[in-house]
Image (cartoon, grey):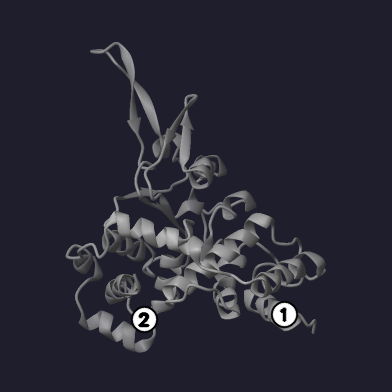
Amino acid sequence: MDLVVKRIIDQVGQVLLGKEHQVKLSLACLLARGHLLIEDLPGMGKTTLAHCLAATLGLDYDRVQFTSDLLPADILGVSVFDRNSSAFQFHAGPVFTQVLLADEINRSTPKTQSALLEAMEENQVTIEGETRQLPVPFFVIATQNPSTQSGTFPLPESQLDRFLMRISLGYPDESSEMALYKGVDPRAIIKTIKPMVSLPVLSRLQDAVNDVRATDQLLSYLQRLVHATRAEDKFTHGLSPRGALAWLRGAKAWALIHQRDYVVPDDIQAVMPAVVGHRIRSVEYGSADHGAMFDYLLKTVDVLGETA
């Protein structure tokens, strides 16, 4: 299992140069059976990451370009009357895939954004009164442009909470960017990628996340961090139980990726920006300065239970 995980990370890293940490977070999100939101400027490699990850894992992949005129039926599907059979035939939408790239999700209206809520939470969609199951695994990778750009609709908190993690790729470092200039077009490399894992092995990796152990002391540390977001007046609202469980699942997946069957405090801290950053806001800074929020939490809550 350890070798499989390393091979996956290495192959995606050959396409997305200099972004090993983000690649690991993306894989951890999938192994934890969550969904991923990538927020960054256009052209930073968001779509490349989604496509490369799907190809490396051998999963079916589909992409929806979200626009202001996109309708829920364009994502979920619609029934069309067939004259030959004198009956309505359901035409499945792109949501019926294993990896769905919701590209520029915040350029669509809230009504269209909400079409994914049931899919992301229940792994199913209800269309015209009939519930239809989605493939397994079902992994949504949504990208969004910064809210400061024109033509964007902010994602409501209920939609944000469906994403286990939110990450940003950022600009490449100098050496990676130079290698990008000298190398082959990443889109050409993706076409040559071979799956590094079978579906049964991927399923076992996801199951293995549940088997990663967390001691009572570790859970106490997590609980105190969560409680600090609720009790301190520095935050507009605290982390919900669902958010806390997402934090724990993310930490377990992070531990598994680093070849451990137990969680340590470093795992909790490593995934905190990705899991917690889009779920809480600072009264003073809003959501603009996540670093200050995280530093405050880590300084306030001691690993061993002592309050700073």
Instruction: Residue at 34%, 50% (x, y): give it.
Output: 63
Q: Nearer the viewer, residue 122 or 3?
A: 3
Instruction: Residue at 58%, 72% (x, y): give it.
Output: 273
- Looking at the rendered structure, which numbered label has been put on residue 159? none
Q: Check disc 2: other Cα within 10 Å, few if <14, some if 14-19, many if 20+.
A: some
Label whose residue precedes the other's in the sequence (2 or 1): 2
Name which quarter of the figure residue 263 lies in. Answer: bottom right
Q: Is 31 on the left or on the right of 118, as rendered?
A: left
Q: Nearer the viewer, residue 306 or 91?
A: 306
Q: Tell me where residue 94 appears, x and y as whole percent.
A: 35, 42
Task: Pick the quarter of the image with the N terminus.
Answer: bottom left
Q: Tell me where residue 299 appears, x and y as whole percent.
A: 72, 83
Amino acid type shown at disc 1: Tyr
Q: Tell me where residue 60 appears, x and y as whole percent.
A: 29, 50
| SS class, disc 2 | loop
Q: Nearer the viewer, residue 242 or 151?
A: 242
- Looking at the rendered structure, which numbered label has been put on residue 296? 1
Name which quarter of the figure residue 183 lies in. Answer: bottom left
Residue farthest toward the top in the current orientation of the protein? 86
- Name the residue tied to disc 2: 18
Instruction: Residue at 71%, 77% (x, y): give it.
Output: 297
Q: Tell me where residue 80 appears, x and y as whole percent.
A: 34, 22
Residue farthest toward the left in the current orientation of the protein? 192
Q: Quick check: 108 above or below 292?
A: above
| SS class, disc 1 | helix
Q: Check disc 1: other Cα within 10 Å, few if <14, some if 14-19, many if 20+.
A: few
